[in-house]
Image (cartoon, coloured by chain):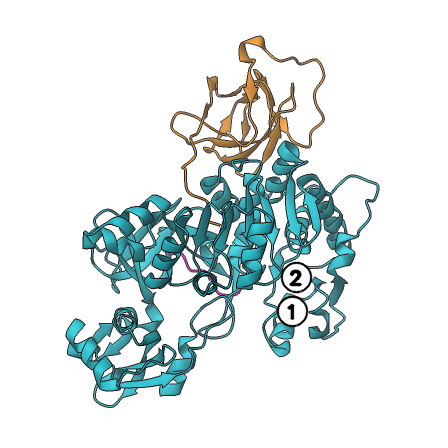
Chain colours: A cyan, B orange
Amino acid sequence: MNIATILDMAAEAFGERTALVAGTSRYCYADLRAHALRAARMFKASGAGYVALLDVNSPAGPAALFGAAYAGIPYVPINYRLTRTEINELLGRVAPAIVVVGPGQRPQIDERADLTIVDRDDVLALADTDGEPPVPPEDGRAIAVQLFTSGTTGKPKAAILRHENLMSYIVGTVEFASADTDDAIIVAVPPYHIAGISAVLSSTYACRRMVQLERFDPELWIETVRRERVTHAFLVPTMLQRIVEQLEAGASSIDLPTLRAIAYGGGKMPLVTIEKAMRLLPHVDFTNAYGLTETSSTIAVLTPEDHRTAFASHDPAIRRRLGSVGKPAAVEIQIRDEAGKVLGPEQAGLVFVRGPQVSGEYLALGSQLDADGWFPTKDRGYMDADGYLYLDGRADDVIVRGGENISPGEIEDVLLSHPAVADAVCVAMPDVEWGEAVAAAVVLKPGAQVSVAELQELVRSKLRSSRVPQRIVFKDALPYNETGKLLRRVIRQEFA
Amino acid sequence: MPMPLKAGARLKSAVSETQVMVVKAPPGEHDLRCGGVEMIAATAPPPAGVALDPAYAGETLIGKRYVNADESLELLCTKGGQGVLSFNGTLLEIKQAKQLPSSD
C-alpha cells in the first residue's frame, strides 16, 4: 500500500485532465506523475533518509510528496514561517535529507554536509531519463509523511503518518474520479499543514483540478476564485473571517458564481463568522471538517444540509448545531471521563477516536493508542443524542479552580456575545486561594468601549460566579499562529 | 494455487489489464481470481497459455472497491480491465462508498 497509487490511478484514468494550476503554469495528471517519477529517481539517488520541503505552495510540493512516495522515502514539509534557528533545528532532526527549497527560502538554510539542497525549479525541470521508473514499495507500514506539530504547547513533536493511514483516509472518504470535468479546488493552506497534504491527496484521487495560492491573501483568493472558475475551497477559520471582512467591506464583489462548496477546519469557527458567510454566500455549501494531524485529517463532518437546517431553525437544540463539528466520518468517536469511563449524550469529557486512518504516533514517543486502538485527541467535548460532536477546547487549556474544571470556551462565548467585544480568550492564572483562577484578554471592536465590571457581570448573569474572570485585560490583538491557532500559552505567560 | 493475501499488496490479472490493491484480507490462503484465472503479483511476468474464462467475463472498474459478503476481504481496483473478480469461488461485489461532502 503506497499513496503513489493515488497518482497512478488519476494519471491512468484522467491523464489529460488538469491537475495543478499555479499562476500561469498548468500540469495535467500525466505531467504531475512524470515529474514525480523524475523527482523520485533524484531522491533515491541522493541516499537521503527524508525528502524535506521548505517552500510556499508551488507545483514542487505535490511533485515532492508523490516523488518521495515513489522513492519509498518519508516526506517532511517544514513550516517556512518559523525562525531561521527553528527551521535549521528541524532540518537537523531529519538529516541526512534532500531539501526541496523555494527561491525565497534558500537563504534560511544553514549549509551542512548531510543536507542536499535543491531548488524547486530544478526539481520541476528534471529531464526524463532512460530505464524503468521506480517501483513504489508496497509496505503500508512505511512512513509516508512526517509533520512537525505546531508546538503551541512545547517543542514540536514529529507526527508520523504511514501509507496505510493516508490510503485508508482517502479510500474511505473520497470516491475515485468523483470530480466533474470543470471542478476546481483552491488550495490556500500551506504545504506543511495536514490540510495541505490531504488537499493534494483527496483532489488527486477525485481527479479534481487544484489551483494553488502561494500564500493566503483574501483579495487574491477572491480574484483567483473568479478567474479560475473555482468550485471548491478549504479554509481555516481565520481565512474565512478575512474573506468575509473583505466581502462585507465591499472591497471585492461577492459575485462568485462558480463557487459551490467551502470546507473549513483547523480551529474553532466563531459562530458570527459562519453565519455571516452563509448570509453572504447563500449558494455555497459549507462543510465543517474536524480533524487532526495525527488522524490523517478529517474525522467528523458537519454537512451542508446540517448547516442549512441549523441556520433556519428556531429550535435551540437544532440551531446550536452550527457550532458543532458534526458526526463521525470514517472513524468511531467516544467521549470519556478522566478515569476512562465512556460517557453518554450531553456529558462533557475527552474525545477519543479509532479507525485505520488514525496514526496517533510520534517519532521517539511511539504510539499513543490505547490497547483497543483508541487515540486521545486531547480535545474536550460532548455529543448530543443524535451523535453530533461539540468541541470545548483542548484538555490542556482547562482551568482548574478549586478542584472545579472550567472550560475557557464557554466563558469566551459569553464575552464574545457582548457587542463591544471583537475577540476574547480565557486562560488559567495562578491564584493563592483557588490554585488557578480565570483570567481573560479581550480585544474591543474599533471605537467600542466596555468596562471590566460590565463584562464580569455579563459572565455572572449567563454562567455562574466561579466562571467570572478575576482579571480582564484589554489588548489590541490576540496572538495567532499563521494557520489561525490561538497561542494560549503566550497569554498564559502574561498572567503568570 | 491458493495464496496468502497481505494488505497493501498489488496484484494483477493473468488474462487482462486489471490490477488491484489489497485493502484488507482475512488470514490464511485464498483463491483470488480475475476472469476465472488466478491473479498474480503486479511485478510477475504474465503466464503463457491462460485465457479468460467466458463464465467470468465482464469488467472490473478502476476506483471501485470490491468486497466479499462479510467484507473481510476488500480490494481496490487500481487499473480497470476485463474479467470479474472472484474469491474462493464467489463473485465479489462493489462496495458502496460512504458519501461524504468534500472536506479537504
Q: What chain is tagged by disc 2? A: A
- Pointer 1 local density, CA inside 10 Å: few below 14, some 14–19, many at least 20: many
- Per the rendering, the mark at residue A52 is 2
Residue A331 locus on image (x, y percent): 38, 46
Residue visible at 26% across and 85% down in the picture: A451
Quarter assignment of residue A132: top right
Determine whether A418 is above or below A265 in the image. below
Instruction: Give the mark, 1 or 2, whose residue is nearer the N terminus.
Output: 2
Q: Quadrant of the N terminus of chain A?
A: top right
- Tell me which amino acid carries mark 2: Ala
Q: Is-magenta flag for residue A84?
A: no
Residue B12 in view here: yes
In which quadrant of the rendered view does residue B57 lie?
top right
In the rendered image, the residue lying farthest to the bottom is A432
Callouts 1 and 2 close, C-beta under 8 Å: yes
Instruction: Tell me where residue A191 appears, x and y as whole percent.
Output: 59, 59
Mark 2 element type: strand
Residue A138 in the image, given as x and y percentages of width and height: 61, 42
The residue range painted magenta reads A363-371
Which quarter of the rendering shows the C terminus of chain A?
bottom left
Q: Give above or below for A178 relative to A388.
A: above
Report which residue position mark 1 lands on: A91
Q: Main secondary structure of the magenta part?
A: loop
Which of the chains bears the disc numbered 1?
A
Toward the viewer: A140 or A12?
A12
Q: Secondary structure at mark 1?
A: helix
Is A365 within the magenta? yes
